[in-house]
Image: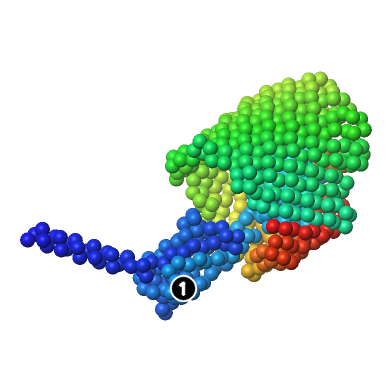
Amino acid sequence: MLKTVVLAALLALTAGAAAGAAPDDLLVGSVRDGSGLPVSGAQVRAIGEGGRQVGAGSVEEDGTFALVLSSTPQVVEVHCRYCRSQRVAVSGASNLVVIVQRYAALESDVPTSGDLAALPYGRIADDLALMPFVVASAGDTNVSERSLAGGRGLILDSGVPLGDFATGSSALVDFPDRYVQSISVTGPAEAFRYGSYAGGGIFALGPASEPATYAAVDSGAAPALALEPDFATVHPAYGESNDDGILARRADLGVTSDFAGGVLDASTGGASEQFGEYGPGGDAASRSADLFHVGYATSSRRYRSFVDFSAADVAVFDDVTEQNEYRSSYLSADVRLEQPGPVTVAIGALTTRQTAFALADVPLTGRSYNETSYVEAKTGTEDAGAYAGLGLSDITVLETLSDGRSDGARLALVPSFGGRVPLGSSGIYARAGYSESLRVPTLIESETEALTPPNGAPLERDELEEIALGFDDGGRVRGEGIAYREDVHGFDETRQLGLGASLVWQIAPLVSLRAWTLRATPQDYDQSYQVFQGYDGSGYQSSYGVPPQAQTSRQVGWATYANGNGLRFDAIAHRDIGLGTNGIRLDGDAYVPFARQAALDVGTAQTVGKRHFYLGLRTR
C-alpha cells in the first residue's frame, strides 16, 4: 500500500512539472546590434496586461535569452549599457530577434572603424589625438597620454611593440592614409610590462579584421587606397597614399588559426615611404620598415597563457648621400600566464634586444638590452575594482657617441597601482592611480645632451600620480575631471601639474558630442631641458627648450551625426596653446551612402599648417 501511494505521488509531481514546462510559458530570442554582434549583459523584461512584469532575464554572451513566463506577454523591453532602449511587441511569437542601437561614442573609448573611415585625417596621430588626454608630438611622430611635454607612448604595430632606439620615431609613420582600422589603448598603468617606452600609454594599431576598401583623391591630387579583404583565417591588406609630398606604401599578411588546443596568430608586414624634397636636410630620402610577429594563446578554466615573438627593422636612406641616416632593429620575446578568478593574477617575462645607428655630425651606434619580469593582480569590474603591478627590469645600454663610449646598466623596480570606487548609486565615482615607467633615451638625445650623467648611460624614470572624479549614467552621459602630477627623473629633469576634464554626451539618438580639455603647468622647470622631435618626413628638427612656467593646453570638441550605416557628419574643433600649433582649427567631413555597398566621403582638415580638401569613394 505504501509503495502504491508513493508511486502515485511521484507520477502526479512529474505530470505537474511537465505541465509547468509548456512551450507557451517560455519566451526565447536574441539581442543584436546594428552590426549583427551580440549584446551580452542586456536586461530583458516581458510585460503583460496592465504593464505588469511577467518575466525577466539577461542576455548571454552569445546574444541569446530565455524568459520563464508567469502569464502571456504583450511586449518585450530590452535595456543595455550605452544603448537605446528597445520595446518590441510579442504578437504571439515565442522566438524573438531584437535589434538595438548602440551609442558608439560612449561604448568605445577609442575611434571606431566607422570613425576612422569617415574622419578627415590621413595621419593616424590626428585620429588618436581625438581621444581624451592624448596629445600628438610635434611632427606627429608619436602620441602620449597626458604628457604634454612630448610623445612618450609605445606603439604596438600589428602586435610588435616598437620603440625606436635611434631617433624616437614611432611606428605611426608606417601607416598610409586610411589604413589603420583597429585601435586599442592601454594607459600608463601597464608600462611595467614593457620595461621601457610605455610611460605615455600603449597604443595597439593594425589593419581591419573585416573586409574593407577605401579610395580617395583630394584637391591636391593626392590619392589614397586601402584594400583589406578577409579570407577565413587569412587576412591580407595593402594600402598606399600620397600626401604632402610623402608617398607611403604598406602590405600586411596575417593568419589566425586554431592550433594544438590554442589560437595561433602570425603576421608579417612591410612599409616604405618616399619623402622627395621632405627628406633630411631637404634631400630626397626613403624609409623602410619590416616586421614579424607570432603569438600563441591557450585558455582553460584555470589558466590562460600567451607567448609572443616579435622582430622589426627600420631604416631611412638618403638618396643624395647614398647612405643610411639611421637604422634600428628590434627583437622581443614575451611570455605571460594568467589565473582568472575573483582576483586575476598574472606573471610574465619580456626580453628585448635593440641595435641602432644614427648619422648626426658623426656616426652614432648603440645597443640596448632589456630583461623584465613582472607580476600583476586585478579584481572587481570596470565600475568598481583595483589593480596592482610590479616590474623588475634589468636594462643595459651601450652607446658610442662623438665624445666617447657611454655604457651603463640599471636594475630598476617599477610599481603601479590604483582603483575605482562608486560613490553611491547615482553613477558618481572616484578613482586614483600611481605608476612608474622607464625610458631609454635615443642616440640623438644622448648626443645632444650637454652633460653626461655621472653614472654612465642615461635612463629616464617617469612617475605619474592622478586622481579623478567622474559621472557615468550607463546610458547617454559620461564625464570626468582629473588632476595629476608627472615627474621625470634621470636623463630629463622635469615636473608638471595638470588638470583635465572630458565629456561624452549622446545628445539625441543620432547626435553625440565628445569634448575634452587638458592643461599642464611645468614646476621648477630646468631651462636646459630639451625634447628631440624625431624624424617626421621634413627633416630632423633641432632640440628646443620651453621657458620656465610656460603652460601648455589643448581643447578638443567633436560633434557627430551618425545614422547607422547611413548619413554621417562630423565637426571637429581644436585649440592648442604652447604645442607648436597655437590657435583654433576647424575640421569636418560628410559620409553619404549612395548605393548598398558604396558611399561618398568628403571632408577638410588642417594638418602641418596646410588646409586639405578631399573627395573619396568607399566600398564595403
Quadrant location, the C terminus:
bottom right
| Residue beneath the point at 67% across and 52% down | 211
**Mark 1 neighbour density, 10 Å: few (under 14) some (14–19) many (20 or more):** some
Quadrant location, the N terminus:
bottom left
| Residue beneath the point at 85% across and 33% down | 317
| Residue beneath the point at 43% across and 69% down | 94
Q: Position of residue 137 (x, y in %)?
A: 78, 45
- Please determine whether, in this image, residue 380 is positioned above or below residue 539: below
Asked if residue 576 shows in the view, the reply is yes
Q: Nearer the viewer, residue 603 or 229?
A: 229
Q: Nearer the viewer, residue 501 or 389?
A: 389
| Residue beneath the point at 80% across and 61% down | 602
Q: Amino acid at mark 1?
A: Val
Q: Is residue 602 left or right of residue 61?
A: right
The way the protein has been coloured in the rendering is rainbow
Q: Is residue 72 left or right of residue 107?
A: left
Asked if residue 521 shows in the view, the reply is no
Tell which residue pokes out farthest to the left in this image.
Answer: 1
Which residue has dot 1 on it? Answer: 90
Q: Position of residue 312 (x, y in %)?
A: 71, 33
